[in-house]
Image (cartoon, rainbow, N blue to C red):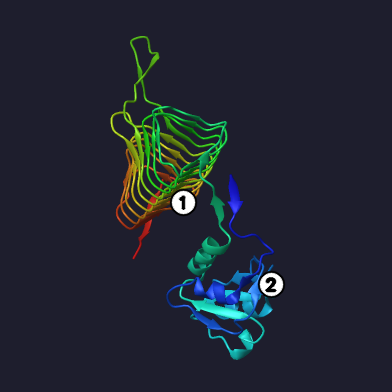
C-alpha cells in the first residue's frame, strides 16, 4: 500500500521549510507564510514552492517574473531587497540538492511494509520484516534486506541477494540467464548453464522493466547506491561499482566492469568484457567497444575519448 506523506493543499510553513535544510542556507524575506504545493518557477502560483538553478542575471529575471511564494536559489545571485519584498528566498550552494531534501521531507511517497496477497514468495526466501512486496510479484529463494521496496509484477529468481533500502520498480526481472550458448557438432545451440547469482548492494534504485542477468560462475554485482534507469539491461557477471548512474535504455554487456561514480548516459551500449574506470562518463547513444580509463569522457559510434574529467 502506498500513502502520501504530504499532498498538495496541505499547508507547510516557510519556517518549517527552512528548518528542514541543514548547512549553509540563508533565508531572506517573510518567514510567516506557507506553501501548498511545489511547481516549476514558470508555473508556480502564490502558494507554491519553486527553485531556480541559474546563477546569473537569467536566474534573477526568472525569480522576478515568478509568482512563487518561496524560491530556493543559488547563494551566488546578487539579489536586492526588492527581490524578496513579496516572497521568500532561500539561498543555498546547491538549489537542486536543497529542493530534493525538502521534497524528501514533505512530499515523498511513503510505502507501508507488507506482502501483497497476490505475490508469490518461496518458503525458503529470507525477507526482512519491513520489506514491501507489491501485487503479482514472484520472489524465489532470495535474501531481501531491511527497508527494501519491490513494486508489482516484478520477478526475482532464486539466488539473488538484495541489500537494505533497495527500490525496484514494476516489471523488473532479476536473475534470468543470459545469452550464453555453444554450438554442437550439428551446428545447433546448446545452453551454457549459469550457476552464479546476483548481489545487489544497499541503496540501489531501479526504474521499471530493468533486466539483470545472473552470473555464469560468479555473481553479477550492482554496487552500493547505484541507480539503473527504466529498460536497462545488465549482462551476466557484470560488475557495476558504487554510486554509478546507468541511464534509461542502456545496455551493459556480460562481464563488463564499471568503476565507482561513473555514468552511462541515455541509450548507450557497452560491449561485453569492457572495463570502464572510476568517474568516467559515457555519452548518450554511444557504442563502447574499447576500455575506458578513470575520468575519461567518451561518446560516439564507436565511442572515442573527448576529454578527461577534472
Choose between 185 and 218: the one closer to the eye: 218
Choose between 179 and 287: the one closer to the eye: 179
Instruction: Give coordinates of residue 157: x percent, y percent.
Output: 43, 29
Q: How far apart are marks 2 and 1 (CA)?
A: 36 Å
Q: Can you tell which of label 2 and label 1 is closer to the viewer? A: 2
Q: In this view, does 46 lie to the left or right of 56?
A: right
Chain-order first, disc 2 or disc 1: 2
The residue shown at (64%, 87%) is 85
Location of residue 176 (image quadrant)? top left
Q: Residue 65 carries which label?
A: none
Element under disc 1: loop
Q: In this view, does 116 lie above or below 17?
A: above
The residue shown at (48%, 51%) is 284
- Tell me, yes or no, if residue 273 can be seen here: yes
Contact check, label 2 and label 1, Cβ < 8 Å: no
Which residue in the protein does label 1 denote?
265
Instruction: Give coordinates of residue 233: x percent, y percent.
Output: 45, 38
Q: Is residue 308 left or right of residue 73?
A: left
Mark 2 nearby-residue class (10 Å; few <14, some 14–19, many ≥20):
many
Specify the farthest residue to the top. Answer: 186
Amino acid at each position: 500500500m502506498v500513502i502520501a506523506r504530504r499532498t498538495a493543499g496541505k499547508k507547510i510553513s516557510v519556517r518549517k521549510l527552512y528548518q528542514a535544510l541543514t548547512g549553509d542556507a540563508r533565508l531572506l524575506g517573510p518567514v510567516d507564510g506557507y506553501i501548498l504545493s511545489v511547481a516549476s518557477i514558470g508555473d508556480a502560483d502564490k502558494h507554491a514552492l519553486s527553485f531556480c538553478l541559474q546563477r546569473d542575471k537569467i536566474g534573477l529575471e526568472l525569480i522576478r517574473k515568478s509568482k512563487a511564494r518561496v524560491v530556493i536559489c543559488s547563494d551566488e545571485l546578487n539579489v536586492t531587497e526588492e527581490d524578496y519584498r513579496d516572497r521568500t528566498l532561500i539561498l543555498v550552494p546547491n538549489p537542486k540538492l536543497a529542493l530534493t531534501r525538502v521534497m524528501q521531507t514533505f512530499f515523498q511517497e511513503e510505502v507501508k511494509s507488507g506482502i501483497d496477497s497476490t505475490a508469490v514468495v518461496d518458503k525458503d526466501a529470507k525477507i526482512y520484516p519491513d520489506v514491501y512486496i507489491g501485487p503479482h510479484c514472484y520472489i524465489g529463494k532470495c535474501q531481501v534486506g531491511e527497508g527494501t521496496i519491490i513494486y508489482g509484477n516484478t520477478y526475482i529468481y532464486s539466488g539473488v541477494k538484495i541489500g537494505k533500502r533497495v527500490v525496484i520498480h514494476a516489471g523488473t526481472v532479476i536473475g534470468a540467464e543470459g545469452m550464453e550458448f555453444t554450438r554442437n557438432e550439428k551446428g545447433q545451440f546448446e545452453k551454457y548453464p549459469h550457476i552464479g547469482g546476483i548481489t545487489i548492494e544497499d541503496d540501489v534504485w531501479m526504474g521499471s522493466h530493468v533486466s539483470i542477468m545472473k552470473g555464469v560462475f560468479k555473481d553479477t554485482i550492482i554496487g552500493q547506491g547505484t541507480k539503473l534507469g527504466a529498460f536497462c539491461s545488465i549482462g551476466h557477471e557484470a560488475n557495476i561499482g558504487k554510486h554509478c548512474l546507468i541511464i534509461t535504455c542502456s545496455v551493459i554487456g556480460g562481464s563488463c566492469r564499471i568503476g565507482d561514480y561513473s555514468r552511462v548516459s541515455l541509450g548507450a551500449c557497452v560491449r561485453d568484457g569492457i572495463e570502464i574506470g572510476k568517474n568516467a562518463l559515457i555519452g548518450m547513444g554511444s557504442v563502447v567497444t574499447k576500455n575506458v580509463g578513470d575520468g575519461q569522457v567518451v561518446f560516439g559510434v564507436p565511442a572515442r575519448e573527448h576529454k578527461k574529467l577534472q
